[in-house]
Image (cartoon, rainbow, N blue to C red):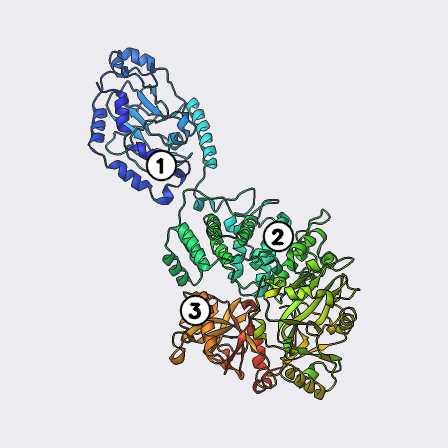
Amino acid sequence: MISIRGIVRACSLVPKFLQPVFNSTILKPHINSFNCYDSYIGFVNKRNMSQKSILSFFKTTPKKPAELNKEPSLQNDSVASNASEESPVKNEKRLSKRQRLESSDEESAPVSPKTNPEKKKVKRQRIESSGSESDKSAEDMEVVVRKDVGAVKTYSSPRSKKKALVQESPKSKIKVKEEKTTPEPKEKMSPKTEKKTPSLFQNGVTKKIKEAPSSVKQENLSPKSDKDSKTDADSNTDKDKSKKDSKPFLEKKDNVIVNGAKVAETDYNPAKPKYHPIDDACWTKGQEVPYLALAKTLEAIEETSSRLKIIEILANYLRSVIVLTPEDLLPSIYMCLNQLAPAHHSLELGIAETYLMKAVGQCTGRSLAHTRAAARRCGDLGRAAESARAQQRTMGAAARLSARKVFAAFREVARMTGQASVNKKIAKIQSLYVACRQSEARFLIRSFEGKLRIGLAEQSVLQALALAVATTPPCINGEQILDASKGLSQEEFKSRVDEHALLIKTTYCECPDYERLLPALLQHGVHALPTHCRLEPGTPLKPMLASPTRGVGEIFDRFEGVQFTCEWKYDGERAQIHVPGDEAPDLTKAKIFSRNQEDNTSKYPDVVRRLPALLKESVRSCVLDCEAVAYDVANKQILPFQILSTRKRKDAQESEIKVQVCVFVFDLLLLNGRPLVRRPLLQRRALLREHFREVPGEWQFATSKDCTTTEEVQQFLEESVKGSCEGLMVKMLTGDNARYDIARRSHNWLKLKKDYLEGVGDSIDAVVLGAYWGRGRRAGRYGGFLLACRDSGGDEFQALCRLGTGFSDEDLRRLTDSLSQHVIDGPRNYYRYDPSSAPDVWFAAHAVWELRCADLSLSPAHRAAQGLVAADRGISLRFPRFVREREDKTPEQATTAQQIADMYLAQDQVRNQQTKKVDNDDFY
């Protein structure tokens, strides 16, 4: 006779390789999400000849019932032969005691089938896996052998309605249980007494047993006893607990509320009206801020065009951060600004777009060409990465990203150097990317690119911070106020917000370091910021800038009845010199910073060496505003800026320097630890000349003259031109407007260049977006270029003109080589241009060029300042010409659309048609 062990092993051949996959604690809660259920059932239904033989064996009426209780482990093949010798009476007496073998961790209690009244003896055999396979036992199937009819009934997933095969546990013994039920009349069960059995594809979830397949004889089941119900309840409790402990797929966890938060991370909405910083947050006090919360905030800002609404959205998010996790305020502010550290730390990610595409492609199984095509189609690599991540399915959910950890990863990538640094950076990017959910991937990749492009400028971030602390002040004395606007009128609250904003912006201008400003704000409050964050040597300031003027007459219109001075405008590079010290100046820590707050100390080792000759004995520390100019020492003559640009930018050796510089000092911002920026220029200039020396050819004060008439200004302008300068800087000497306005393009300083007297009132710094291939003499090189201005409100570049004049053959060769390193596949989504002007080659926004032109005019073919002057037309340059490259400026510092509009309105032919414009200085 064939042994039962052999039968069981034969039946388990097919499921043996399927059950570990389908019963995985990671996979089984999500089989349905992958539509694998039907495929599995379809596979099971394809029975081969051996399976049919096995089924036919079970359908054959067996001989006498087997006595299996003696050997539950099924290790003795003689069980079947012994069972044939048992008498029916003895067997019935033995089966009157219902025995139950406890199931494994996740399996529910067995089902007691109802017997047909015509059948007197029923014996049910149950094969279950042991506790060592607890993670699989919830999916084990039951086989009921009806001795009196020779039929086999299988219980598997209620959805399948199919016969399942019995699998033998590879690691444990298979246990067999016997049951005998008392014959009862066949009747229909009520809904309350329907039996439940484990579902094959649902972990810890029980469902009602549905009809068996037609090939299997159906039988009604009898209600369970109280004891059985209690056992089932305990089993269900264990299964529920197992379900909570299981790790489902990422897509299934996204909408889960975690750590006691009142809002799910995917439902977080900082744009919600009447936002509550605790109830509407998706994290709890002390918990790290989820990166998805920041991504949701940036996503809402990107979809909003109103600046006031943008400030409100960001302020809501910052309120929750201040109340719940103030430690994450600094990473949040930095990531909103797409910065890693203060500018003078020179910490940059340095990730090329190709490396980002490679990282995204490797994570999603796509080639580099496929990823590049997707980025071109979307117009944005961030959106392409988000789309690719959304289509990806993973076996398990990675750890959720937090804002703090993502920011730390950014800094880690930025500090990676060496030969293997590129591969290390790509690996780090991939580890973050695979953990992204929803819009996290979009902003993660954009952050690595270095451009968020959501229309969020630094001034808006500072304004949002002011609104946040005005509404929800930091907890300083143990008292937390969630909404300080209650009880105040709209005007009173707005006045408070404006006061906070002025304090924060002014303090940041003097101390542009968030790592000092934000801790002081959280610890001492906004009103204590000026005390704890002050101008200090070593922290560079954003310099004060001047507004352009078109003629001498405008100077007297602006400075009527006010004392002013005129200084030569030197054609060099802005240099801000910092000398720290307490009792004496520490020249070893002296620093030289550019107008972009970059550390240029290694570029000017000769200037640092000459510092002792500049400082008198009364100077212990100082901050000087200067201009470094190329200088011919032999002829004592100022040289053009183009010669200065040939100096090595970093790590220059003084012995190798060929281009000498003379530093022209024109302002004093700090002396012996005392900031002087709020003092009038007249006092600052007096202190400068009192405490510092002049050394011809090395250190000189800016040539200046206090003028009172138009003739004097005109004469002094001509002298500056003869002295190889660009023109004049006209500054107020006395009064409140004579202070040093940090980070402002102020109308208290005016610049009058030699070529401003006719045509446009200012040169224009434009960003190169694309190029057109040259013809004739310019064949094989770029012959023309598409240039743009920057719209700071929308954080985009708007086409301004096509440029093809002002270049020499050498210029075109050099520019072709340098621009070829920044070629991209197509225009960015933040490029605004007319398709008729589309160039042959597109560039990443990198190069800034200085242009001059005859005048400005409205143009339907360009998008610069569209909507500021005319609703359907932009502004373009007439007869533009190339002047020089502005290597000292970034695309973010290019001429803005608002400045282009102001230049257009300042022209004589349109000035009389417009109402008089009110000058409002603002932070740039």
At label 3, counting other C-alpha atoms closer than 10 Å, the crowd grade (few under 14, some 14-19, many 20 or more) is many
Left or right: where 285 falls relative to 219 = right
**Amino acid on which disc 3 is placed:** Trp
Left or right: where 218 falls relative to 560 = left
| Element under disc 1 | helix
| The disc label shown at residue 329, or none | 2
Which of the pair 727/258 is nearer the observer? 727
Comparing labels 3 and 1, the label whose residue is closer to the camera: 3
Marks 2/3: CA–CA distance: 38 Å
Q: Which residue is mark 3?
A: 842
Residue at point 56%, 46% (across, down):
262
Q: Which residue is mark 1?
A: 22
Q: Earlier in the sequence, mark 3 or mark 1?
A: 1
**Above or below — where is 69 with respect to 376?**
above
Can residue 494 be seen? no
Q: Earlier in the sequence, mark 2 or mark 3?
A: 2
Marks 3/1: CA–CA distance: 51 Å
| Element under disc 3 | strand
Name the spot of residue 239 as percent of width and height, x first. Answer: 44, 32
Can residue 676 be seen? yes
| The disc label shown at residue 728, or none | none
Q: Earlier in the sequence, mark 1 or mark 2?
A: 1
Name the spot of residue 223 as percent of width and height, x first. Answer: 38, 26
| Element under disc 2 | helix
At label 1, counting other C-alpha atoms closer than 10 Å, the crowd grade (few under 14, some 14-19, many 20 or more) is many
**Amino acid on which disc 1 is placed:** Phe
**Amino acid on which disc 2 is placed:** Leu
